[in-house]
Amino acid sequence: MAQEMADEFKDAHIALTIAGTALEVSAIHRGGDKAPIVFLHGFGSTKEDYADIVRHAQFDGHPFLAYDAPGCGATHCADLARIDITFLVETALAMIERVGFKRFHLVGHSMGGLTALMLAHRHPERVLSFVDIEGNVAPEDCFLSRQIVEHARDSDERFFDDFIERTRHAPAFASALYSASLRHKVRAQAVGPIFRSMVALSDHGELMEKFLALPFPRLFMYGAQNAGLSYLDSLRTQGVSLAQIEDCGHFPMYSNPVAMWQSIAAFIRA
């Protein structure tokens, strides 16, 4: 089994310097003759959220890239205080250059969705389509990140401890599962800079305008538990495809991954 996995995607550790900060980025990728797909994971997650692409025949032939964002997973960052959404966008662009993707489908979840949106806004000519899995497009999307303001603490570690405990008991699908690995997947010193950047962009970055102005097909994916998001009808009327994932909250890759992969595959095929 291990050899089969090794044949289906490759591991890589890529040294980068972003804004004067040294990184060693842990990634998985594969080649292929179809259009490439770039995956950006959410806060508290890792590249392995997307490793199961190799288990779904609908994606056969598609090259892909997924990697641990700075401050997360097995990626090393020399200065965690530098990590914000702009830093994550620059990291994404550098990684895409390293694997040689010229044009690509873009998939991002939550923090990764916001990163993908800012990347796509900057370089729309390179993006074939965008699957936004509950990425931030409005102030109401900061239900996790705004806790850095609403539940401020006197240390990074204290805030993160409290955040994990609140998340563990949140009344949403997969919250306890998600919380169980947070301490292993995120450096506490990276949480504040990332969250403050997400809140600032959500409140003042005109994200909805940027999203609606993108000149390629867009799919906004959300869990059925979040069907009350105020902007869904507006997205639909303005030409954005919607995918509601049943039995799911913010984390389709944990709660209903089969439906998530089916929705992504159908959208890319279309």
Image (cartoon, rainbow, N blue to C red):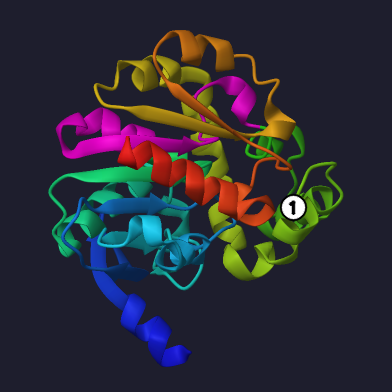
Q: Where is residue 132 in the image (x, y as percent from the top left)?
A: 45, 36
Q: Residues within 10 Å of mark 1 (few under 14, many from 20)?
A: many
| In the image, residue 62 lies in the stretch drawn in magenta | no
Residue at the image point whose x is 43% and y is 30% from the top:
219
* Amino acid tagged 1: Ala
Q: Is residue 205 visible?
A: no
Residue at the image point whose x is 44% and y is 24% from the top:
241
Which secondary structure lies at badge 1?
A: loop
Give the vertical position of 124 relative to 106 (above or below).
above
| In the image, residue 126 lies in the stretch drawn in magenta | yes
Residue at the image point whose x is 16% and y is 56% from the top:
97
Quadrant of the rendered structure where residue 96 is? bottom left
Number of numbered markers? 1
| Tag 1 residue | 174
Relative depth, front residue between 196 and 256: 256
Magenta residue span: 117-142
User: Is residue 127 shown left or right of residue 248?
Assistant: left
Q: Position of residue 190 (x, y in %)?
A: 53, 55
Relative depth, front residue between 31 and 262: 262
User: Is residue 123 shown left or right of residue 73?
Assistant: left
Give the vertical position of 90 relative to 33 (above or below).
above
User: Is residue 9 shown left or right of residue 110?
Assistant: left
Q: Is residue 158 visible?
A: yes
Residue at the image point whose x is 52% and y is 31% from the top:
136
Q: Where is residue 140 in the image (x, y as percent from the top left)?
A: 63, 22
Give the vertical position of 153 relative to 68 (above or below).
above
Relative depth, front residue between 225 and 156: 225
